[in-house]
Image (cartoon, rainbow, N blue to C red):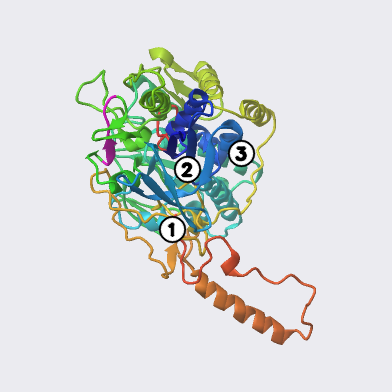
């Protein structure tokens, strides 16, 4: 008798926990396959510290292969599920197609950036959902401060050192808090002209910072931001974004080269593509995390609308806390459906929230006890160390070094502006010229903030903002091959030496996804702290 085949789609908080628990319970009695675009689990709550230069990127990643030894990892992104045929179709990082058959399916695809129909945002803003976006933001902020320090024009200097963050939830609040400290540290060694200092603006249409939390935590975060110099503007958002700045809803135009979009997330469009009942873009499931009418299909995390048994008629919010716990419940119920154990409904108890405000400042309410200052900072860092499934010693070491040594503010140039567009189905992976878009995004009309910007079609150039300058046009792979050939021909005419001993340029056809005629795909934090988002 063949072993049951279990396929888990997504390795965020929910998918990773499901795989880990199932591997323990199955003990080789089931074939468990984890499909994910990257080979790591990303601990999203610490992503702002990567952007601020506190933590090195690998500190917030946990190897899937090393920590899930009895799970088969398949690199790729699901672009279709045949429920009747019980197969998952995917595209791997090099553009090859594949199919996985299953007896049990766990959909934990997570979420993507939530877009709003604001002119210019898709072209000129960048999100904060994945490691490439954090690396880009760190380089971009460093570059803008350096260019501002060298600018002769006071207006250019002011625009380059102005940073606008939209969304005062977990992500936006932490990005603004860490960002102000990061840029202030940079200009202490290299002052700006005329005594200028970096300017950070936090916008939200809500009445207060962190509107989803206890008002006491909100007041703590608001006070800390304002004392640090962040301009907190509630009841205000972006009306239009341009290459030179943003027009606010109150009529003010703010010159800037930096727009960080942290308004929240929407469920991954993969959930909507299944044609099953949805709740605001999330797949409806029963309290056991099973899809009604499809007992072999389970869903958890941001992709699932899980009934909140403590609040009848409501669904659990899209938070990392819920995703992590739902992953365990999903694993237990998948095992029970195969005859091992008993099914149990998903129930939860609120353990409180923590918000890291940089330095020694934080806002926290563990078990409902509101804290601020040093106590909150200690609880926040302790919580993160306890919650991380790996790299605890390395993270603690980076925190210790940051406390006693100045940060290195250098540009690595690893991620370009066009590689992390806001409108993307895959924020986990930086886009590249010639790389195919594994899954065409759908118009998530049933989800909040459905995208209104048209997607890039194969063969068309993709225009994107390049650090506040003129939009950069990225050539298709076919155009790149032609340009490369012309360049080599011209070089041959200029030099009599054929340069036989030099390595030949790599053909685009041999690069990942480098089929001629393909354009870069559109560039997958749930506002995540212990509280926002699963992957």
Q: Which of marks 1 and 3 is nearer the N terminus?
A: 3
Whole-angstrom CA distance, mark 3 to mark 2, is 21 Å
Q: Is residue 436 above or below residue 49?
A: below
The crowd level at tag 2 (other Cα within 10 Å; few <14, some 14-19, many 20+) is many
Q: Position of residue 221 (x, y in %)?
A: 42, 27
Front in this rendered view, residue 107 or 460: 107
Secondary structure of the residue carrying tag 1 is: loop
What number is the disc on residue 437? 1
What residue does disc 3 label?
A: 58
Q: In this view, does 290 lie above or below 453?
A: above
Residue 462 horizontal side relative to residue 392, left or right: left
Residue 358 horizontal side relative to residue 318, left or right: right
Q: Which of marks 1 and 2 is nearer the N terminus?
A: 2
Q: What stretch is highlighted in magenta?
A: 281-287
| Quadrant in which the C terminus appears | top left
Query: Are discs 1 and 2 less than 8 Å apart at CB?
Result: no
Q: Is residue 351 above or below residue 444?
A: above
Q: In this view, does 428 lie above or below 170?
A: below
Residue 161 shown in magenta: no
């Amino acid at each position: 008798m063949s072993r049951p085949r279990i396929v888990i789609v997504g390795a965020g908080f929910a998918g990773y926990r499901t795989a880990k628990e199932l591997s323990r319970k199955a003990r080789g009695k089931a074939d468990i396959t984890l499909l994910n675009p990257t080979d790591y689990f990303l601990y999203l709550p610490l992503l702002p510290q990567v952007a601020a230069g506190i933590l090195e990127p690998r500190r917030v990643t946990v190897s899937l292969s090393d920590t899930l030894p009895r799970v088969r990892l398949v690199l790729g992104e699901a672009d279709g599920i045949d429920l009747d045929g019980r197969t998952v179709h995917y595209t791997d990082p090099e553009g090859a197609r594949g199919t996985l058959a299953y007896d049990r399916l766990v959909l934990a695809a997570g979420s993507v950036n939530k877009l709003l129909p604001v002119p210019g945002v898709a072209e000129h803003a960048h999100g904060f959902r994945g490691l490439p976006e954090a690396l880009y933001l760190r380089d971009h902020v460093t570059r803008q401060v350096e260019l501002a320090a060298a600018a002769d024009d006071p207006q250019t200097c002011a625009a380059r050192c102005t940073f606008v963050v939209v969304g005062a939830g977990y992500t936006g609040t932490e990005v603004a808090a860490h960002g102000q400290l990061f840029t202030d540290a940079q200009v202490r060694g290299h002052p700006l002209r005329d005594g200028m200092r970096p300017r950070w603006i936090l916008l939200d249409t809500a009445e207060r910072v962190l509107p989803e939390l206890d008002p006491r935590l909100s007041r703590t975060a608001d006070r800390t931001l304002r004392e640090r110099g962040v301009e907190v503007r509630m009841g205000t958002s972006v009306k239009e974004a341009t290459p030179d700045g943003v027009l606010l809803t109150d009529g003010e135009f703010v010159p800037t080269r930096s727009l960080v979009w942290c308004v929240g997330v929407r469920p991954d469009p993969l959930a909507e593509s299944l044609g099953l009942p949805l709740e605001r873009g999330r797949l409806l499931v029963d309290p056991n995390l099973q899809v009604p009418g499809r007992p072999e299909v389970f869903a958890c995390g941001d992709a699932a609308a899980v009934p909140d048994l403590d609040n009848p008629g409501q669904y659990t919010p899209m938070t990392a806390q819920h995703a992590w716990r739902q992953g365990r419940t999903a694993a237990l119920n998948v095992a029970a459906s195969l005859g091992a154990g008993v099914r149990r409904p998903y129930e939860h108890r609120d353990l409180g929230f923590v918000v890291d405000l940089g330095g020694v400042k934080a806002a926290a309410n563990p078990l409902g006890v509101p804290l601020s200052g040093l106590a909150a900072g200690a609880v926040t860092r302790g919580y993160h160390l306890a919650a991380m499934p790996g790299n605890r010693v390395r993270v603690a070491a980076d925190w210790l070094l940051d406390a006693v040594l100045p940060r290195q503010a250098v540009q690595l140039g690893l991620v370009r502006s066009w590689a992390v567009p806001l409108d993307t189905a895959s924020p986990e992976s930086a886009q590249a010229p010639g790389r195919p878009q594994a899954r065409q995004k759908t118009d998530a009309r049933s989800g909040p903030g459905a995208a209104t910007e048209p997607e890039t079609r194969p063969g068309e150039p993709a225009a994107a903002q390049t650090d506040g300058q003129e939009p950069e046009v990225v050539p298709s792979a076919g155009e790149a091959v032609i340009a490369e050939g012309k360049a080599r021909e011209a070089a041959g005419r200029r030099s009599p030496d054929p340069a036989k001993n030099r390595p030949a340029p790599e053909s685009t056809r041999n690069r990942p996804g480098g089929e001629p005629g393909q354009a870069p795909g559109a560039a997958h934090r749930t506002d995540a702290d212990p509280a926002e988002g699963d992957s």
